Amino acid sequence: MSPMLDLRPRLRLLDAIAGPHGVDGYLEQLDPLLVTGECRAEVVGVERGTEESVTLTLRPNRAWRGFRAGQFVNVAVEIDGVRHQRCYSPACAEGRGGTLEITTKRHPEGLVSNFLVDRARPGMVVGLSGAEGDFQLPSPRPESILLIGGGSGITPLMAILRTLFAEGYEGGVALLHYAPDPARAIYRAELERLAAAHPNFHLARSYTRAPGAGEIDGHFSPLHLPQADPCFTEAETFACGPPALLDAVRGTWAGGLEHRLHVESFVPPTFVPVGEPGEGAIRFAGAGVEVENSGASLLEQAEAAGLSPSYGCRMGICHTCTCRKRAGTHKNLLTGEVSSAPDEEIQLCVSAALGDLTVEL
Amino acid sequence: MTTALPTAPPPTSLTVVDGLTTNPYGLSPEQFESLGTELDAIRGRVLADRGERDADYIRGVIRAQRGLEVAGRGLLWAGVVPPFWVAGTAALSLSKILDNMEIGHNVMHGQYEWMNDPKLSGKQFEWDTACPADQWRHSHNYMHHTHTNVVGKDRDIGYGVLRMSEDQPWSPYYLGNPLWAALLATFFQYGVALHDLEVERIASGETTLAEKRELLEGIWQKVRRQAFKDYVAFPALSGPLFVFPLAGNATANLVRNLWSFTIIFCGHFPEGTHEFSEEETANETRGQWYHRQLLGSANLSGGRLFHILSGNLSFQIEHHLFPDLPANRYAEISVEVQEICERYGLPYNVGPLHRQFGSVVKKICRLALPDSAGRVSRKLAPLSVGRKIGRGVTNLGRSVLSRRPLRRA
């Protein structure tokens, strides 16, 4: 019996009538936001806060189930016909309804980020995933909280701050924020306002390329901690930023304090180093199998690893073996085309991995 | 393509090379190689060029189909009014044709997979016809497209019920060839639905129904859903006037069946298309594979709307060379493919629908009878009657089928 039969009669009839494309297949022709089975959002506000960044206000459709402060969502945009998806942490207070705020910065090779910085406009519709990630503000709220953010890693921390203050949080909150200079410090004005309005919020900023402009100077150092929060060892700590910052923070918390530390790596779209055929490892995520990359086609390697992916022609014609690549660089053996895009459909029989690669198989 | 290439030797005689029909136009191994390279180059160029315009195209067709379907269903709801019935049935027929041909068939080939849109993913798409999409992907994308026109492997040759090739041994059953063809055309969606079941192999005892249980279950589920929608749910919405939408839906299904049968049978069976044997194609190179697709397929000439309604299967040759390129590109590619054929001295089989389909009907009737004494098996005389092809240019509407021997490039 198909799962369809388990639904109420009214829905069964509607589904039967709208099949095989489903009600959404027709609703989206009227308005892409009317779909019920897929989360999408309309861009309702575009604010180019600094010359390098853009803050978007998104109004999700009915399929949106809300998020917890600190979590991230996947935002999908279509660029020249191709759908690209990237993770962004909403910076707004948590909740189920209302709008979402995301901020992104320009990056030399950030396809999606640059597209949003340059081309986002009100009325644009983007795809949205459900909120994901364990990096989130716990409930009940901890008694004291330390936040450490670098670059655009400030966004999930903003969500935490805004949530706390919206709730009238009375514990102590401190933020150590690292940015190149005041002009490129996202949310600078709002942070200053919050610090002025809430005596329990302590703000310490370091502008790494403008020494003297902030309360502290230089890259993260344990010496910054007492200035931000004298009782930092007691505080539930949330750190988000580039890998170097997080490594330094992890090092400081190592040796007994790890349980107080929550980190979220915030890196620009990963640039997988392009390896040679035969280098790296191939991970078949569905099966949980990892093998050394022999350089042969992914189909052959999957079979050699004992998996039985479906296949047909084995020559790139029939698309029976098409599978989603999550990450890594692959080369199309027919066309020689090399692609490092995450989350794309590839044909296993004519694709070889250049370095590490993960497929959903 | 202006690359200097070895000119094809003229097909001086219509004889066999190495005793096989694989190479009736006498291409040298180097020419096979360069044919493959040239066609790969076209493919590579289009792959790199795919973008917004292809995305807009397929979404536009989907939008038109959904609009036609809603309009058709709406008009048929009030189908008691005769003009509404006629307009509704026409709109629904068009909707089903677009859904199956230009959208379903092409999307399921993975032509739009590069867009990364789950709704246009070849593996997830389901279409408005009795055949379950996953079974179609196997019987069509893999079996038919890989083994095109290989007698014994490509089950599109006769769909297991017709005799479409001299290489299928005659039996008295085939006296009914024209009748079986008419029935297949009428109930084509069910013929396609049963395709992967290989009914004839069950009949001959090669496989059993028990082994095909899972397939059968899938077909039954899909057929039931489709029938419920068209013959129960929508008619029920019209209450006591149910008979009007019922008749309209049945007519739309019939129109789609006849149309898709006609287009599909014009793809590989018109006069001049070649068939191959398993031995001939056992170890073929990429160039030879392209060559087989070229010789085994035939195009239909017509206007833009005709091409769209045929799912661009009117560019069957281009489709078989490049089954996963977006179909809206076939028209522009066809110019280059014709030029390549010209240079290599290969036929490019194209003609208007009435002529191509006429020759298919003739073949269906001719093959109903045992091969006449005067006719020899294809393997001995590969270019016997029905295998002479001329060349021409589609867009000018010039005839390409000719009774004269091949002209030379």
Image: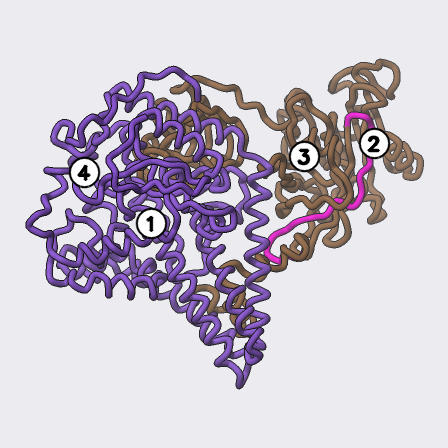
Chain colours: A brown, B purple
Q: Which residue is at a point 52% across and 26% down the rendered structure image?
A: A340
Q: Secondary structure at mark 2?
A: loop
| Marks 2, 4: nearer the viewer | 4
Compared with residue B380, is residue B235 higher up or lower down, i.e. above or below? below
Q: Is residue B1 something one can see in this rendering?
A: yes
| Marks 4, 3: nearer the viewer | 4
Question: Please, what is the three-letter code of the amino acid marked with disc 1?
Answer: Gln
| Residue for badge 1 | B356
Q: Position of residue A127 (x, y in %)?
A: 64, 45
Compared with residue A337, is residue A315 higher up or lower down, i.e. above or below? below
Q: Is residue A171 left or right of residue B334?
A: right
Could you tell me how far apart the alpha carbons at marks 3 and 2 are, in whole angstroms?
A: 33 Å
Could you tell me how far apart the alpha carbons at marks 2 and 1 are, in whole angstroms?
A: 64 Å
| Residue for badge 4 | B383
Q: Quadrant of the N terminus of chain A?
A: bottom left
> Which residue is nearer to you in this view: A117 or A152?
A117
Q: Quadrant of the C terminus of chain A?
A: top left
Q: Are marks 2 and 4 in contact (CB under 8 Å)?
A: no
